[in-house]
Image (cartoon, rainbow, N blue to C red):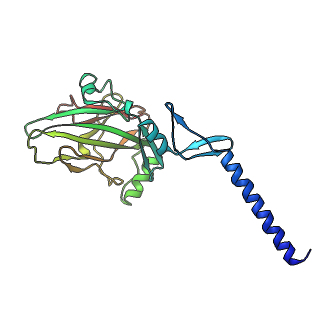
Amino acid sequence: MNKRRLITAAIASFVLVSTFSAGAYAATKINLIVNGKTTSADIQEIKGAPYVSLKDVGNLLGANVKYDSKTKTATITSKGNTTSPSTNDTVQSSRTKPASIGSTQSFTVDTALKKHTGQVSITQVIRGDEAWKLISQANTFNTPPKEGYEYILAKANVKIVSNKKNADAAVDIWKGDFVLVSSAGTDYDTLLAVLPDPGIDAKVYAGSSAEGWVAFQVKKDDLSPVISFARKYDGSGGVWFKTN
């Protein structure tokens, strides 16, 4: 076979294989039906199983999907896991009955200096070596946890619904609003460290929200501490969340 015939045969083989592959792909297209409706989501078959992106899953099910590239964490929150303000009024969290991670709780602050309402949630909790890795990367002057302790990072979201003290003023949200309390009922010390971005400290007007990290040091053998938010000076009231 001369050189010209060899090239012609190779081209013919390529066209044949390409045509076969295209036909095979069309023949194996996967349809996705959700609640009786056919969707247009892009589905791929990998090792005999169908795969669809988390974003598409969230859209199809009416859920919120968030991805934190720093911690490589994807979070899916369905509408059913977000408690409405009216429900929170009857199912208020407490130190002995803390709310779950991902749930939303209503709160009211009513003092001589502050009078506002809002909603708060803890959307993510990272503990141990992974938390220390993120804290050490945030600032080289951050120190390792003390002996027998480890770090906890919690991502919080705070929304201000109304500012009754001054409707035109912003409400100060800062990490000191959050306190870690041990399983036995003792406050942990306030942490002095530079936290990963974003931090929770912000000025928030009614109708807006802030989301960011808060951090604590916790005893390694304290497996179920709780986080309080906006509690009173004597430690009562406020909103409480689990850490696991």
Direction from residue 120 to residue 218 in the image, left or right: right
> Which residue is more in the foreground, 112 or 29?
29
Direction from residue 229 to residue 11 in the image, left or right: right
At horizontal 25% and vertical 36% (from top left) the residue drawn is 119
Where is 222 relative to 87, above or below? below
> Which residue is more in the foreground, 153 or 155?
155
Q: Residue 38: x, y in percent?
A: 52, 37
> Which residue is more in the foreground, 208 or 221?
208
Where is 152 relative to 87, above or below? below
Where is 166 relative to 98, above or below? below
Name the quadrant of the N terminus: bottom right
| Quadrant of residue 117 within the rendered picture | top left
Name the quadrant of the C terminus: top left
Q: Residue 107: x, y in percent?
A: 22, 33
At horizontal 36% and vertical 53% (from top left) the residue drawn is 196
> Which residue is more in the foreground, 81 or 10?
10
At horizontal 29% and vertical 31% (from top left) the residue drawn is 240
At horizontal 76% and vertical 58% (from top left) the residue drawn is 17
Viewer can see residue 128: no
Q: How many marks overall?
A: 0
Q: Residue furthest right?
A: 1
Q: Residue 64: x, y in percent?
A: 40, 41
